[in-house]
Image: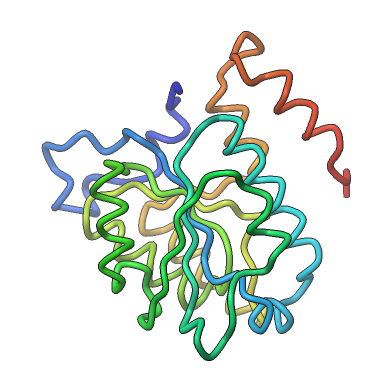
Amino acid sequence: IKITNILAMSIDIKKNPKSEGKETVGQPGLLVMDMQDSLLSMINNNHELEEAIVFSLKAFDLLKLPICFTEQVPGKLGNTNDTILSASSSFECFSKKSFSAFGCSDFVDWVDRRRIQNLIVCGIETPICIYQTCVDALHRGIAVTLLVDCLGSRRVLDSKVALDQLRAFGCCALPVETLIYSMMDNSEHDSFRDVSSIVRSRDTN
């Protein structure tokens, strides 16, 4: 899969000294954070968020990119929404207690094992778990791309402020379709027809 310049812009080396001398854009991986029913029910526009993430998972499956889920204290808060889980045919799922996914050793192992150099992030909540995870990724020299139409929060203003700050730190923020078509680069990509088919099935609102 070709990672184009639009992904290469997702981290500013000057703002992240640890990434100096490293190749900052390599294997991308999708992280879906904490899409548990008990948390999802409190999120603004939760139905639209669920549909957008289901679409993202289907597209990433077609592109054969690594996918993982995190669940925040699932023993208390329950597991990931069944519809979302069933949208992907291949993924790993990690339980965490920390707000940042990087507080989970199994997730860190996934990042290292898969050699993730561009972490594509979606889920909830933007000003809490998403924010802390993205900051930790940048500190590790990992580029971050946020799927802006696949993020959720209880408070709209908090989400906007957190997202603006992450952009200032060097995260790239894009709609999922923009990212997917950037990855395919052109209509000759092997997955173009299949991806275009599920794109056409999406609600246009």
Q: Which quadrant is home to the N terminus?
A: top left
Residue 101 position within the rendered picture, expressed as x and y whole percent measured from the top left: 37, 68
The answer to whether residue 160 of the structure is visible from this angle is: no
The answer to whether residue 186 of the structure is visible from this angle is: yes
Q: Quadrant of residue 117?
A: top left
Spot the residue most to the bottom: 76
Work out whether residue 151 or residue 40 is closer to the camera in this orientation and state it: 40
Identify the residue shown where x is 55% and y is 30%: 63
Residue 95 position within the rendered picture, expressed as x and y whole percent measured from the top left: 42, 73
Identify the residue shown where x is 13% and y is 43%: 20
Identify the residue shown where x is 67% and y is 69%: 81
Residue 84 position within the rendered picture, expressed as x and y whole percent measured from the top left: 68, 59
Where is 84 relative to 26, above or below?
Answer: below
Spot the residue most to the left: 21
Work out whether residue 106 or residue 181 is closer to the camera in this orientation and state it: 106
Residue 132 position within the rendered picture, expressed as x and y whole percent measured from the top left: 38, 72
Where is 87 relative to 81, above or below?
Answer: above
In the image, 153: left or right of 141?
A: right
Identify the residue shown where x is 88% and y is 46%: 203
In the image, 63: left or right of 142?
A: right
Instruction: Say how many tags the image has.
Output: 0
In the image, 144: left or right of 200?
A: left
Looking at the picture, the colour scheme in use is rainbow
